[in-house]
Amino acid sequence: MSASCHHHSNFDGASLRYKRILLIVIAINAGMFMVEMAFGISGQSQSLKADALDFLGDSATYAMSLWAIGKSVETRSLVALIKGVSLLLMAAWVLISTLHYVIYSNEPSAPIMGWVGLAALAANLFSVLLLLRYRDGDANVRSVWLCSRNDAIGNVAVMLAAAAVYLSGTHWPDLLVAIILAALFSNSAIKIIRQSLNERKHLH
C-alpha cells in the first residue's frame, strides 16, 4: 500500500510494515508498564502509577488492534469501541485512586518521578515517530495513534510534576497531573467511541 493511503480515514492497518511497527510498540509498552509501575510504587507517585497503567492498557489494546487488522469493518469498529470504553474505565480508576491519595498519600519521590518519566518519554516518543505516518485511519488505527500521543504528553506532564513536587515539597502537583491524565484518557476515549459508533452506523 502506498504512503498516501495512510493519510485517509479508510486505512485499516492491512500493511506488513504497520503490523511490524505495532509489534514493536506493543513490546515497548509492556516493558515500560513493568518498569514504571515498580518505580511508581517504590516512589509513592500516583502520576507514575497512572502512566504505568496507561502503558498496560495500551499494550493490551494494541494487541487487540493487531488481531483486528484484516477483519471486517464491524469487527474493527467493535474492537475500537472496546478500547474506548476501557480508556474511560481507566480514567475512572485514576480519579478514584487519586482521591484516595489526597487523603492518605505521603510525599512522592521527585527524583524517581523525573528519571522514570524521562525514560517513559523516550520510549513513547520513539513509538510516536514509528506511528506518525499512520495517525489517520479507521477507528482501530486512529485509536493506536491517539493512545501513543497521549502517552508522550502524559510523560511530559509527569516530569513537570516531578519538578513541581521537588520545588514545593508537597504531593499536590503529582495528584494534579494524575487528574489531568484521567481527563486526557476520557477525551481520547470519547473520540474513539464516536468514530467507532459512526463506522458501525454506516454498516446498516
Image (cartoon, rainbow, N blue to C red):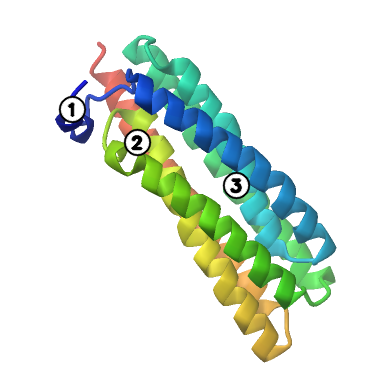
> Upstream in the sequence, badge 2 or badge 1?
1
Label 2, residues with CA under 10 Å away: few <14, some 14-19, many ≥20: many
Q: Quadrant of residue 171?
A: bottom right
Disc 3 to disc 2, C-alpha distance: 17 Å
Residue 93 picture location, percent across and down: 67, 49
Q: Mark 1 points at which residue?
A: 5
Mark 3 lies on residue? 54
Q: Which of 197 and 108 is in front in this view?
A: 108
| Residue 187 visible | no
Q: Where is residue 191 in the image (x, y as percent from the top left)?
A: 36, 42
Q: Nearer the viewer, residue 177 or 39?
A: 39
* Nearer to us: label 2 or label 1: 1
Q: Residue 103's quadrant in the figure?
A: bottom right
Q: Tell me where residue 124 appears, x and y as whole percent.
A: 50, 51
The structure residue drawn at horizontal position 65% and vertical position 55%, both measured from the top left corner, is 50
171 left or right, relative to 59: right
Choose the circle earlier in sequence order: 3 or 1: 1
What is the quadrant of the N terminus in the image?
top left
Q: In this view, does 69 lie above or below 93?
A: above
Say which element carries label 3: helix
- In the structure shown, which secondary structural element does the residue marked by tag 2 occupy? helix
- The kind of residue tagged 2 is Arg
Q: Earlier in the sequence, mark 3 or mark 2?
A: 3
Mark 3 neighbour class, 10 Å CA radius: few under 14, some 14 to 19, many 20 or more: many
Location of residue 112 (image quadrant): bottom right
Mark 3 is on which residue type?
Asp
- The residue under label 2 is 142
Name the secondary structure under disc 1.
Answer: helix
Q: Residue 35 — which label?
A: none
For image coordinates 37% across by 19% down, the residue present is 16
x then y, percent, for residue 158: 59, 67
| Residue type marked 1 | Cys
